[in-house]
Structure formats: structure tokens, C-alpha cells
Image (cartoon, coloured by chain):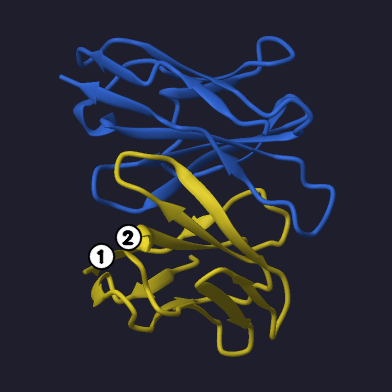
Chain colours: A blue, B yellow
Amino acid sequence: EPEVTQTPSHQVTQMGQEVILRCVPISNHLYFYWYRQILGQKVEFLVSFYNNEISEKSEIFDDQFSVERPDGSNFTLKIRSTKLEDSAMYFCASSLLVSATDTQYFGPGTRLTVL
Amino acid sequence: ELKVEQNPLFLSMQEGKNYTIYCNYSTTSDRLYWYRQDPGKSLESLFVLLSNGAVKQEGRLMASLDTKARLSTLHITAAVHDLSATYFCAVDERGTASKLTFGTGTRLQVTL
């Protein structure tokens, strides 16, 4: 069964450093998303992406964040200058969204630890 | 701003018992999802509920949606240990799946 994959599974970085989190969505999906989950808390929406542009973003997704689809398969989230509070699990998701029953499929996540 | 609340936040139940998790949301929406998350793992889609009165069942789990009451329920029948996980409801406010707003989560622990 097709699945969303993410790399790395765990990233440790120093405060102020740039990180890039990578995702490979399900191949025929058209919509891509990033969410994050701080330990023990609920899942929060960051950004959605369709047709090579951001379709929606949350207040969390400030100028420090950017997303890109550099080729036909990868979808990346870049954090320019990490802060301690960016430590969280980051989930990528994708969706086909051509029928009413389509759901968002989540990847396994990247645990980001900012020291 | 859409708010999605679940209760209870934590539920410890014995195997064989029944229980219901509630998901209340603050705005009109007719598209609601239930996800399961095991510790340290990703989110697994359980149900997509698309209209008022929708009911879906899979094994020991049954989900329903009442859009007028802005309420969804996840009913667990004759719980087994394998159902231990955190369950999230998520609301698609605009019905376009551009953004899911997740509930607070219910951590379910099924004991022998």
C-alpha cells in the first residue's frame, strides 16, 4: 500500500541553525501538508500546498518557515533559524482530494530536537 | 476560530467494557475525521464522516456525526488491549481538506 515517507526520523540541531525536513508524499496525491505536534499535545496545522503554491498557512508558519516541492516527488519544510520552541514532531501528509471520502494520509514524522 | 474539544482526555477501561469518546466542535462543518495514534507513531486514519447522521463502523469502533449538535462520537464496544492508543478527531472546517483542526486527543488505556 502506498505511504507517505519522511526523512530523517530524528533531527537534532542547535538553536539558530537551519533545518530541512523531507517528505515524499503518495505519488498520485495533489495536496500536501505539514503539521506539528509538541510532545504530549495535539496536532497543529502548519501549511497546505497545492499546485506549487501555499494554499493556506497558520499563524505558526511565520517567515522562519518555508515549503518547497523541488522536484516531482519531494516536499520539504525548511526552518531558517530554529528556536527551542520548534522542538516537536513534524508530520507530512498528503491527499488526493478528488472524492468526498478522501482523507489526509500522514507520514511517520520527524522528531526535531533543538538544543 | 474553530475549537475542537474531546472528552475525556484520558480513559482507562477494562477489557470487555463499552465506552464513548466525545468530540465537540465550535463551527458548522459536515466533514469530520477520526485518527488513531500509537505512542511515538504517526496518525492512522480510522473514519471519514461526511454528513449529518453519518455512521461508520470498523470492528469494535463505531463513529457517528451530528452536525446540528456539532458533535461526533467514537463508540468502543467490548474493548480489547489492542485498542490502547490516543484517538483524535479532526474537523475540516471548509470541507476542502485544506486544513484539519485537531481535537485535544483522548488517550485510551485498556487494561486486562
Res B112 → quadrant: bottom left
Q: Is residue A60 left or right of residue A15?
A: right
Res A86 → quadrant: top left
Residue B90 lies, in percent from the top left, at 52, 61
Residue at 51 percent across and 49 percent down: it is B44
Circle 2: residue type: Ser
Closer to the N terminus: mark 1 or mark 2? 2
Question: Marks 1 and 2: same chain?
Answer: yes
Q: Please determine whether, in this image, residue B69 is positioned above or below residue B111.
A: below
Q: Residue furthest bottom?
A: B69
Q: Nearer the viewer, residue B109 or A59?
A: B109
Residue at 63 percent across and 16 percent down: it is A74
Residue B48 lies, in percent from the top left, at 65, 63
According to the image, label 1 marks what residue? B109
The chain containing the residue under callout 2 comes to B
Q: The C terminus of chain A lies in which quarter of the figure?
A: top left
- Return the mark for residue B15: none
Q: The N terminus of chain A lies in which quarter of the figure?
A: top right
Q: Nearer the viewer, residue A63 or A99?
A: A99
- Return the mark for residue B84: 2
Residue A25 lies, in percent from the top left, at 64, 27
Q: Nearer the viewer, residue B59 or B93?
A: B59
Q: Residue furthest right?
A: A98
Q: Is residue B29 left or right of residue B63?
A: right
Q: How many other residues sit within 10 Å of disc 2, few (<14), some (14-19) or many (≥20)?
A: many
Q: Are marks 1 and 2 in contact (CB under 8 Å)?
A: yes
Residue A111 lies, in percent from the top left, at 32, 27
